[in-house]
Image: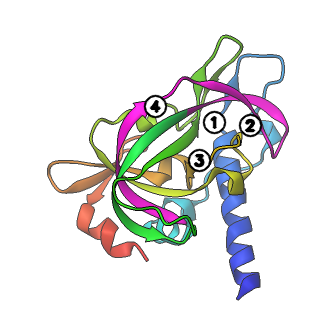
C-alpha cells in the first residue's frame, strides 16, 4: 500500500512539474524553458478522478486577499521564479488528508507561479487563476510536497495539476475551469470527491 501511495505521489509530482514548467516564461538571465522539462499535461490530469485522488485537500473557498508577488527559487531545478500568494477563507471542507485539520472559517494561503517583481516577471498557466471574486472549489497539496513552487517557512498550499486544480462556482450550478474552458455541473464534481 505504501509503494502504491508513493507511486501515485511521484506520478503527481511529475505531472505537476511538467505542466508548470511547460508554461513558464522568465525575464531574467536564468530562464527556465519548456525544453528543460519534457512533456505537457497528461490527459489523466484533466479528469475529475485524478483531481479527487491527487488532492490532499479539497475545499470550497473565497479569495480574501492577494499578496504582493515575491521572488523565489524552484527547488526541483534550483531556478529563480516569481510566485504570488492569495489568502482564501475556507467555506467548506470536502476532503482533508493533510493532517493539519483545516476547518470552515480558516484562512489559508494558496501559492501559484506567476507575477511581477522589481527583479523578475513570470507568466505561467496559473497566472491570475486566484483572481476570481466568487467561490471556488480548489484541489490542493502542501507546496513543500510539490518541489516545483518556491517554499518558505510558512505553510502554503498549491493547486494540484495547475489550472486543473481550480473550479469557479457559477450561479447556474456549474463549476468551471476557466483557464481551459471546461464547464461541468457542480453536483458532478462534488460526486467525484473521495
Query: Which sits in the foreground, 140 or 173?
Result: 140
The mark that comes first in sequence, 1 or 3, is 1
Marks 2 and 1, how far apart at CA: 7 Å
Query: Going by the image, does 41 lie left or right of 188?
Result: right
Q: Residue at 32%, 69% (x, y): give it.
A: 190
Instruction: Kindly check if marks 4 and 2 are in contact, taking CB atoms under 8 A apart as contact.
Output: no
Query: Which sits in the foreground, 66 or 45?
Result: 66
Magenta stretch secondary structure, dominant: strand
The disc label shown at residue 128, or none: 4
Crowd class of label 4 (few under 14; some 14 to 19; many from 20; radius 10 Å): some
State the SS at label 3.
Answer: loop
State the SS at label 1.
Answer: loop
Q: Is residue 56 above or below residue 21?
A: below
Marks 4 and 2, how far apart at CA: 20 Å
Residue holding disc 2: 34
| Mark closer to the observer (3, 4) | 3
Residue holding disc 1: 23
| Mark closer to the observer (4, 2) | 4
Residue 37 at what x, y percent from top left? 78, 44
Amino acid at each position: 500500500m505504501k509503494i502504491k501511495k508513493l507511486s501515485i505521489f511521484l506520478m503527481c509530482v511529475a505531472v505537476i512539474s511538467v505542466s508548470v514548467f511547460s508554461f513558464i516564461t522568465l525575464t531574467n538571465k536564468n530562464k527556465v524553458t519548456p525544453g528543460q522539462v519534457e512533456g505537457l499535461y497528461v490527459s489523466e490530469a484533466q479528469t475529475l478522478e485524478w483531481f479527487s485522488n491527487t488532492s490532499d485537500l479539497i475545499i470550497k473557498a473565497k479569495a480574501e486577499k492577494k499578496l504582493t508577488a515575491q521572488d523565489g527559487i524552484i527547488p526541483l531545478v534550483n531556478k529563480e521564479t516569481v510566485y504570488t500568494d492569495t489568502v482564501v477563507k475556507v467555506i467548506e471542507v470536502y476532503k482533508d488528508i493533510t493532517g493539519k485539520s483545516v476547518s470552515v472559517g480558516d484562512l489559508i494561503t494558496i501559492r501559484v507561479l506567476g507575477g511581477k517583481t522589481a527583479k523578475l516577471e513570470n507568466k505561467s498557466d496559473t497566472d491570475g487563476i486566484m483572481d476570481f471574486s466568487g467561490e471556488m472549489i480548489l484541489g490542493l497539496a502542501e507546496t513543500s510536497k510539490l518541489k516545483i513552487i518556491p517554499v518558505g517557512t510558512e505553510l502554503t498550499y498549491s493547486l494540484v495539476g495547475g489550472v486543473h486544480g481550480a473550479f469557479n462556482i457559477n450561479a447556474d450550478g456549474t463549476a468551471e475551469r476557466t483557464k481551459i474552458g471546461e464547464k461541468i455541473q457542480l453536483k458532478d464534481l462534488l460526486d467525484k470527491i473521495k
